[in-house]
Image (tube, helix red, strand yellow):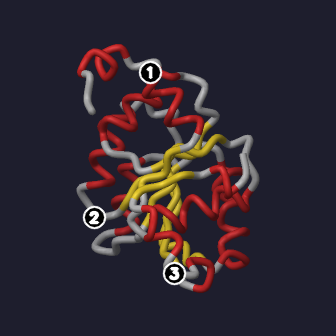
């Protein structure tokens, strides 16, 4: 997947502004030090200001205190055993948007993250350029629809039975 494969809503939000020029405030929750350190190292090159980095949502919220980044990058499964729905909802309660950055191999967890309000799912197999592009879209208020979100929705029986138009 490359950045051009992302479709999003509202369509004009990403097209009307050069998103790459704007500073975006971010934070990350991942239980792997290497991911957090790599993300921290990449932030400057993408004009991201890293506000906090933690291995759990509780640690992140404590580190942020009253600071609210635009986007919080969140791993789907954390070593503390916390539920993805709870993690997404706790992050959203701060006013930040949530982007799931994960192996994304458990569709039930991906669906749970989307249902809880995550604005994007980006697999860890994607490049940093693709992650940065998705972060910028989410910061601009765009919900990213890519192959991961489409697959999660397509496999959601309850969603299909709702017959939404």
Q: Which residue is mark 3?
A: 17
First of labels 1, 3 by sequence position: 3
Residue closest to the eye, 75 or 126: 126
Compared across the picture, whether 15 is left or right of 113 comes to: right
In the picture shown, does residue 56 fall above or below 69?
A: above
CB-based contact (under 8 Å), mark 1 and mark 3: no
Q: Residue at x 59, y 52 (%)?
A: 6
Q: Tell me the distance, in whole angstroms, between the alpha carbons under discs 1 and 2.
A: 25 Å
Q: Which residue is mark 1?
A: 108
| Residue 74 locus on image (x, y percent) | 49, 48
Considering the image in quadrants, where does the C terminus appear? Answer: top left
| Residue 153 locus on image (x, y percent) | 43, 28
Residue closest to the eye, 157 or 10: 10
Q: Which mark is residue 95?
A: 2
- The picture quadrant where one finds residue 132 is bottom right
| Residue 105 locus on image (x, y percent) | 60, 25
Find numbered disc 3 in the image and state the secondary structure of the residue it sits on. loop
| Residue 58 locus on image (x, y percent) | 35, 50
Q: Residues within 10 Å of mark 2 (few under 14, many from 20)?
A: few
Q: Nearer the viewer, mark 2 or mark 3?
A: 3
């Amino acid at each position: 997947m490359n950045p051009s494969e992302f479709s999003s809503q509202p369509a004009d939000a990403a097209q009307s502004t050069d998103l790459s020029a704007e500073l975006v405030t971010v934070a990350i929750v991942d239980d792997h030090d290497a991911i957090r350190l790599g993300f921290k190292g990449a932030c400057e090159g993408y004009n991201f200001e890293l506000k906090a980095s933690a291995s759990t949502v509780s640690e992140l919220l404590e580190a942020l205190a009253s600071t609210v980044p635009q986007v919080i990058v969140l791993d789907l499964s954390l070593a503390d055993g916390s539920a993805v729905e709870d993690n997404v909802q706790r992050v959203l309660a701060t006013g930040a948007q949530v982007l799931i950055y994960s192996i994304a191999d458990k569709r039930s967890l991906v669906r749970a993250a989307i249902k809880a309000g995550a604005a994007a799912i980006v697999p860890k197999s994607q490049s940093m350029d693709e992650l940065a592009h998705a972060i910028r879209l989410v910061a601009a208020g765009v919900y990213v629809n890519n192959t991961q979100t489409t697959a999660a929705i397509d496999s959601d029986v309850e969603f299909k039975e709702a017959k939404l138009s």
